[in-house]
Image: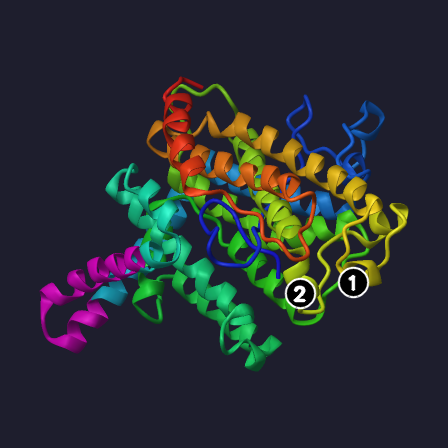
Amino acid sequence: MAGSSAVYTSCRPHARAFLLPADQRGGLLPAAAWRRGGAAPRASLVAARTATEEAVYEVVLRQAALVEDLQGRRAAREAEAGRRRWRDEQVEQEGDAELGWGLLGDAYDRCGEVCAEYAKTFYLGTQLMTPERRKAVWAIYVWCRRTDELVDGPNSSYITPKALDRWEKRLEDLFEGRPYDMYDAALSDTASKFPIDIQPFRDMIEGMRLDLWKSRYRTFDELYLYCYYVAGTVGLMTVPVMGIAPDSKASAESVYNAALALGIANQLTNILRDVGEDSRRGRIYLPLDELAQAGLTEEDIFRGKVTDKWRRFMKGQIQRARLFFDEAEKGVMHLDSASRWPVLASLWLYRQILDAIEANDYNNFTKRAYVGKAKKFLSLPAAYARAALSP
């Protein structure tokens, strides 16, 4: 399956997340504007959105409204009450009043350990955040990873739609202050402190359902929805935690759009990086109609031979991913200063994977593109300097 975004670059073999860049009115550009493998969108294409885009856009508006509306605080108070009930139950079970509070701290610590083990670079970036934000991001990361492993982990062959239904019910319980285990408790506490909407979490589970049966995507519009489910959701989950800069004049909606764009860019990048790996698993995460327009077939993918047709096709796909990165970078500068550097560094490092694909002469069948340690270290101070600027 294709991999993931800033918060969970280590969860899946591919990156997940992707939003269409905002037009001058702050909305989303229609997928049609990007169907030609990254050609610059034309003004005539901006007006109409597909049904898929409208559905995703509704989630963007909903999450943005939470940040600006008192409903977010009311939901937080309700979740806090549920969390207190859970603590009381733990205290009663253990017979020690201090243990209830200690369990929550232990839960966050364990989330941090998981993040440090599986997402080392990002974990280091979280050290720049305030303690409260850092712990919240860890909790979200762990939930995303656990969700991802349901369909990509060692027991994925035993996962059924009913198992995902149970996982979604468990999600609803933790948002209502009834966590099942320590990891759920950490996320439940996070949801009580920040204006996080449950819908992006539900949508990520929907992406896992897709992976149980779908291994082809006819159009970019279909791929768009999948990428939103498995990666674009991450941006909506984490922006409320990372925060928007107090001196930013950007709307919450535009910042969430940019967060989705980063996820989309990461997802598309990982898809392009892992074409060979996915094909060996019988999966193709490339729009079949665009392959056909380029004179390519599924058999060409499985054959894994780099041809001039393939190079031309890949150039267009890479161009499209870069456009998403460009759009995302604009929004990153409007995040809170304590969150800006790790996100910007992640963006720059992921974008360099596209350069590596080009350096490999577009051979993503047998060569895995990656960014070397030297380039990573060179990118960090540059990202720090850029992130230090005001939005």
Category of crowding for the residue at label 2, using alpha-carbon neighbours closer than 10 angstroms: few (below 14), some (14–19), many (at least 20): some
Vertical order, 162 against 334 (above or below) = below
Name the side, left or right, on which 334 lies relative to 56: left
Q: Amino acid at mark 2?
A: Leu
Give the dominant element type of the magenta stretch: helix, strand or loop. Answer: helix
Residue plotted at (46% across, 43% down): 372
- Work out whether residue 134 or residue 246 is closer to the camera in this orientation and state it: 134
Tell me the element at label 1: helix
Tell me whether circle 1 and circle 2 mark residues in contact (CB < 8 Å).
no
Estimate the x, y position of residue 227 in percent, counting from the top left: 64, 51
- Residue position marked by numbered label 1 in the rendering: 303
Q: Quadrant of residue 3?
A: bottom right
Quadrant occupied by the N terminus: bottom right
- Work out whether residue 182 or residue 361 is closer to the camera in this orientation and state it: 361
| First in residue order: circle 1 vs circle 2 | 2
Name the side, left or right, on which 98 lies relative to 30: left
Name the side, left or right, on which 71 lies relative to 298: left
Estimate the x, y position of residue 242 in percent, counting from the top left: 39, 38
- Residue position marked by numbered label 2 in the rendering: 210
